[in-house]
Image: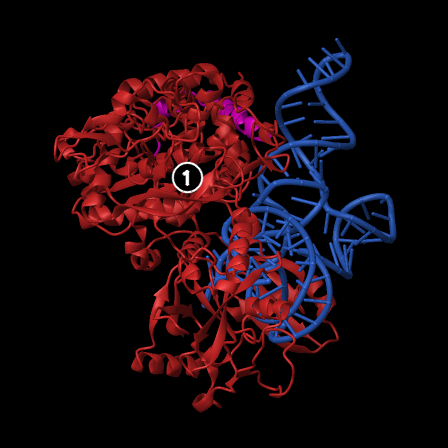
Amino acid sequence: MKYPFEEIEIKWQKFWDEKKVYKTDLSNTAKKLYCLVMLPYPSAAKMHIGHWYNYGPTDSYARFKKLKGFNVFEPLGYDAFGLPAENYAIKTGVHPQDSTLKNIADIREMFLRMGAMYDWDSELMTCVPEYYKWNQWLFLQLYKQGKAYRKNAPVNWCPSCQTVLAREQVLSDGTCERCGTTVIQKALTQWFFKITDYVDELLDGLNKIDWPEKTKAMQVNWIGKSHGTEAEFAIEGHDEKITVFTTRPDTLFGVTYVVLAPEKELVQKITKPEFKEGVDKYIDSIKSLSEVDRTSTVKEKTGVPTGAFAINPVNGERVPIWIADYVLATYGTGYVMAVPGHDKRDFEFAKKFNLPVRKVILQAGTNESDELKEAYTEVGTMINSGKYNGTQSDIGIEKISANLEAQNLGRRTVNYRLRDWLISRQRYWGTPIPIIHCDKCGEVPVPEDQLPVLLPYNVNFKPDGGSPLAGNEEFVHTKCPKCGGNAKRDVDTMDTFVDSSWYFLRYLNPKFNDGMFDSELAKNWMPVDTYVGGAEHAVMHLLYARFIYKFLRDIGLVNGDEPFQKLIHQGTITSQGAKMSKSKGNVVDPNNFTEQYGADVFRMYLMFMGPYDLGGDWSDKGIVGVDRFVQRTYTMFETYKDIAKENPSNDKYEIGGLNDAEKNIYRKVNQTLQKVDIEIDNFRFNTAVAALMELLNELKGLNECRKDLQTYVLERFALMILPLAPHLGEECWNLLGKEKTIFEEPIWFEADSSALTKDNALVVVQINGKVRAKIEMPLDLPEAEVKKIILSDDKVKTHIDGKQLVKEIYVPNKIYNIVVR
RNA sequence: GCCGAAGUGGCGGAAUUGGUAGACGCGCUGGACUCAAAAUCCAGUUUGGCUCAAACCAAGUGCCGGUUCGAGUCCGGCCUUCGGUACCA
């Protein structure tokens, strides 16, 4: 009979639900395992194959761990605030709350259909006051410590999303991470979280966690720590100084000009009157450029002189001050000393504007008088550098830095690329920022007992350039908590990455009323043991969550320094070579396959396709193979219906007491047990499925085994397939005639180690590295015996006859390599 | 440019510490069953040579070179693809 998946899937889902088999007892922490998967965003677009690929295999891992005796906590929630719902509302008029709740219902249904073992009592969504109240509370705690602050700064503005973005949310090509529109720069007063307070810890903590090296490298690069020296250049005729940051103080003698970022205020102060027009014009021309154009490395460098001069602290030399857009106001001090001889960018710039190039580092094997064709940026011997001449430049770095410090003209310092996290959003569908602006008292935090600041339902969320909440009079007008006078609420909402930076703590008790989360539970259940999600969050979510976790630790709410111990990235499933998206029209609907083959086959096929972290281009070519495997499995269990009732198995069999067919199968099943165990544990589902297929092929000889051994084998087969195809697994177990289901009483069979050995060894004979024969012989034979057998082999003889044996290498029970001449 | 990962049959992909390359699956070919087809089952399937066939021989894991008794795996130099990042001083 064909495996009736519709019937069987519904049957077990209902059963699991009724028995509440997935409810985790959080009071039992002896063998706790927190398995977390990044919470889905409930967008209007239906779940696609990528979702199944993310959630299905992770659930299989969690189930496997449960069978292995772990007390597994596997929760699920919804990242329910955010732009797409609001944009959808603008387009269709459907309120974000309504569409979001509907989408959540759809997603939940899909997860049930998948047969995932989520603890539904822990389900949460971020868009309800019970949740976002605690975003506000978190904000206030950060605020109290000066870690949430407001400043006017040039920020990234997405003209399409009509909101500012954090730096991490701007892609490398200068476009918006969400919508792909080119982001522009705007100076605005916005709220920031001071992630930079934790910068060193965020860097060092990476050494303590089991994450993909690639991801750690991305965070390291993003944080961008660099050691260097600040040097002070006096400005001719001004009291102010220009402090530059450099990683190469050894090249200070090669400075031939100084460059300021055009937007720095100092520029206005020092520009000579006769240069003012040129400078103003230049600054204007820069403003009209987008961030993409501005930072493009291909673009020719531009700049203008200010007419002012700076004094080099090491040699008192007078050098011109320029402004140029290749110097960024946001990195270092915004001022740069230019050493064209030994910096690529400075070289280019100097060549273009005919500024002098001075060689101060001599490349080994070249002459002082050789003209520099390009900047030499490596270590060399210092020249034209006064008393440092002849010094190796890497030593010169130390010497000059020490000297600057001694003269109070500079200091060694550290610079970071990481900037504070901009969390304000000029949008509606998010957490209101709990701040009141009072004319008298200024910025006043909403008292904690007045939280949550509710997000009003009625609001005009059509974009008109400002925050939608500003249009809701009732929301905006309030009393100042300090003086009682009329005041206005902050009308911005928070970046949704705030929601997702601590949701995993809330899962432990989403109904908790006395705080952000149940701190006691968190102390017992954190860190998350295994976290699975997309690599695209490497420098956004995964950095923010680490930061917030460290802050929560500092205010005593959690123990430990890192929230996610082990991190796994699932690969991306593409379709026709591209990411699946509605606009490309290449979205593959999972329902096509679940309707035809059932959830188990589909899940298993996704796992069988290839390595989990690789992803790949979608093709349904092989799904019939997995379907056949499931059909054959089901047929086999039907054939042996109720066998466990009539012929209970032993826990173990003595190899010696088995006939050949039994021996083979007994060994194979135990080998597979060991293999499947290791493979699933390491998220190598493809090889786990393959091992089970191999076993099934071997079980053709099952009817030649004694009955109770048949039970032994089938019990193990059912158990192994269960994490991968949960409905089928339960059904198979049930067919054996078992009273209890596996998930009521999770068990796992350990492999019988005595069954993993072989009777014979197959020794491969190589002659000059080429395989010439394969000879079966008893295990662990002394080498001399082995040699005797091999040299008497006909095939071997033909290859060594008449030749001289030079060398022999024997790898016991495996390889015998003979070198002849 | 820099950082990271990958490149294996017609296809998806296997291969402890260097030790039988191609597991498992798809597809294809042949056969069984069938009036026929589908489904299912059995056998074969890296390429080339030789052969009725088997045996056998040769080549083969992106390219070139190296280390080694032995390299998909290690080392050096490239090429391609995919991610990340990009004037960071």
The chain letter of the blue chain reads B
Q: Is residue A291 above or below residue A158?
A: below
A637 part of magenta stretch: yes
A287 part of magenta stretch: no
Q: Position of residue A732 (x, y in %)?
A: 42, 24
Which residue, given by chain and number where applicable, does mark 1 sit on? A164
Q: Is residue A418 left or right of residue B28?
A: left
**Can residue A417 be seen in the rendering of this structure?**
yes
How packed mark 1 is, by other alpha carbons closer than 10 Å (few <14, some 14-19, many 20 or more), is: many
Q: Position of residue A65 (x, y in %)?
A: 34, 39
Residue extending furthest toward the front: A273
Q: Position of residue A665 (x, y in %)?
A: 48, 39
Q: Is residue A314 above or below residue A738?
A: below
Image quadrant assignment for residue A100: top left
The amino acid type found where label 1 is placed reads: Val
Q: Chain of mark 1?
A: A
Task: Pick the residue in front: A136 or A220.
Answer: A136
Magenta span of residues: A625-650
Rendered residue at 39%/56% (across/down): A223
Image quadrant assignment for residue A352: bottom right
Q: Secondary structure at mark 1?
A: strand
Looking at the magenta stretch, what is its main secondary structure? helix
The chain letter of the red chain reads A
